[in-house]
Image (cartoon, rainbow, N blue to C red):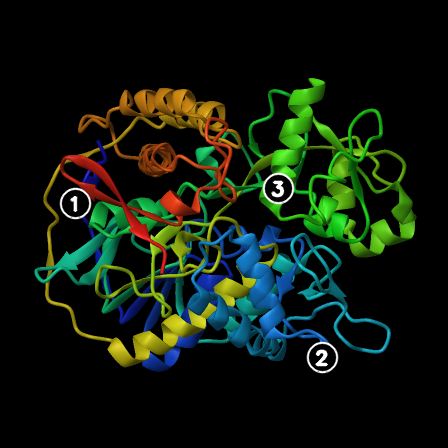
Amino acid sequence: MIPRVLTAPAPGWTADTDIVVIGSGVAGLVAALNCRPHGRVLLVTKALLDAGSTRWAQGGVAAALDPADTPGEHLADTLTAGVGLCSQDAVRALVTDGPDAVRRLIALGAEFDRAPGGDLALGREGGHHRRRIAHAGGDATGAEISRALRAALKESDVEVIEHALVLDLLLDAAGRAAGVTLHVMGQGRPGGVGAVRARAVVLATGGLGQVFAATTNPEVSTGDGVALALRAGAAVTDLEFVQFHPTALWLGPDARGRQPLISEAVRGEGAHLVDRSGTRFMVGRHELAELAPRDVVAKGIMSRMAETGERHMLLDARNFGADLWETRFPTILAACRFHGIDPVTEPIPVVPAAHYASGGIRTDLHGRTSVPGLYACGETACTGVHGANRLASNSLLEGLVFAERIAAAVGAELDEPGAAVAPSGPSGLLDGGARDAIQRIMSADAGVLRDAAGLERAARALDALVPSPDVAPDVAAWEATNLHAVASAIVAAARRRTETRGSHWRDDHPERDDAAWRGHLVTRRTDAGLVTTYEEHR
């Protein structure tokens, strides 16, 4: 059972603003900066401003910035990666608005790598037929984008609260978003649980990778926005499409938590995937070999591991030489060496790890959710851009483009909600220790490879973790309860979709089925449990 609200102390303080933005990745920062003309903006972030996933983005941001490239070609590559489920309107908005959004980011102060003549140095990644990936610091694009946006935020009048976990959405009597409840951890301001009353709420809370035992996501990525939205009655969609990055650094069979990412850009520069015998097993599996879309490469690695009995595959980039490693991929080089691997002289052991949620809170082209006054952008949202599988480096661009679109919508629609009504319905929490159990369940039976028997085991095991009103509220319990809600929704959708498509791979239904499954699974919370319905793709 998914509780209607999290068990928490009554709010001990209140604050008022016009627009509250939850999250400080690229989507949250861009939304906050662009909403300023429309009223007072409060930005809330779970840890520090730069603690989310944006700072870890290595590859770059994709956009048709080369004169030889076109938005139409970018659109075609994105639609191909999405395996028939992308919203063409959303992708068209992304690729059309994208180049200027990147230029505005550069004007704001983001410094991307340049070729000797001064033009942007554009890379190529899996699924792209052209070099269109703008990168910074070699493989530190996310960190540079975050730096530039945080610098702009510091010069703005946006109020910031760090170390604050969002709990639940406040609604008025008409069902319109009226603010949020938060748990603030000190910082010289009122601590504990409080309420922020607002005329619009923007969720940019990032991903849900901590649902799985092995992930490239930081510790804060516990699906808080999706869980909050579910409890508030919002629709979430496409949650079965969790993208596993093909090449996370393998740290041993017992590794848990965030795994270092070996960017797709390494393969874009010519690294090869091989097994212990040196065989390039991706050749012949796809026309792009190692540069195939991520779901294809992840499946190729898992299949080869099953065929050979090996615990990992190898990424061989010894042909780069020390100079290329040190200038193009200094962050990855340092991470590998920290773990005792020198990619200049030896192949890198890699395995797939949970990386990106293509699904999330359902939105329209301007970030509106099914709850009036509630908007979502970034990884917590499902705009329709990614379909069944995200194209590499489209995520930073999506955060830029749709955060700007939300700001435009908020400016036209900023209504005054009625008084917030105390939410009614079942409350409860899981003990914080349930987090480990959830991660084990999901990695064992709802990870890269899925089938009916495993998904049924996962559903039964998750159902056995029952929230209780007697659990003491704290951050660990709130996060575990959010993870449980999200995991339950993922499994419900994965059980329902009896086909293989994109990043959803059913061993018992290995073929794509456009006749029965070219559509979307929409999940909502009811007092009777989660309800998942099918809608034809339009």
Q: Amino acid at mark 1?
A: Ala
Which residue occupies 74% across, 60% down?
Answer: 137
Left or right of 16 in this view: 219: right
The secondary element bearing badge 1 is classed as loop
Report the residue marked by disc 2: 67
| Viewer-closest of 255 and 461 | 461
Instruction: Please state which of the two labelled residues, at mark 1 or mark 2, is closer to the viewer.
Output: 2
**Mark closer to the observer (3, 1):** 3
Q: What kind of residue is marked 2?
A: Pro
Query: How packed is label 2: few (under 14 Cα within 10 Å), some, or many (20 or more)?
Result: few
Which mark identifies residue 296? 3
The amino acid sitting under disc 3 is Val
Percent across and percent down for residue 348 are 78, 34
Mark 3–mark 1 Cα distance, whole angstroms, equals 48 Å
* Callout 3 touching callout 1 (CB < 8 Å): no
Residue of label 1: 10
Dot placed on the residue nearer the N-terminal end, 3 or 1: 1
Q: Quadrant of residue 410?
A: bottom left
Residue 470: x and y in percent read 19, 26
Q: Position of residue 173 (x, y in %)?
A: 8, 60
Label located before the other in sequence (1 or 2): 1
Which residue appears at 75% of the width and 53% of the height? 268
Q: Secondary structure at mark 2?
A: loop
Q: Is residue 187 something one can see in this rendering?
A: no
State how far apart marks 2 and 3 are (Cα). Answer: 30 Å
Q: Would you place residue 411 above or below residue 138 in this image? A: below
User: Taking the image as drawn, is residue 98 in sight?
Assistant: yes
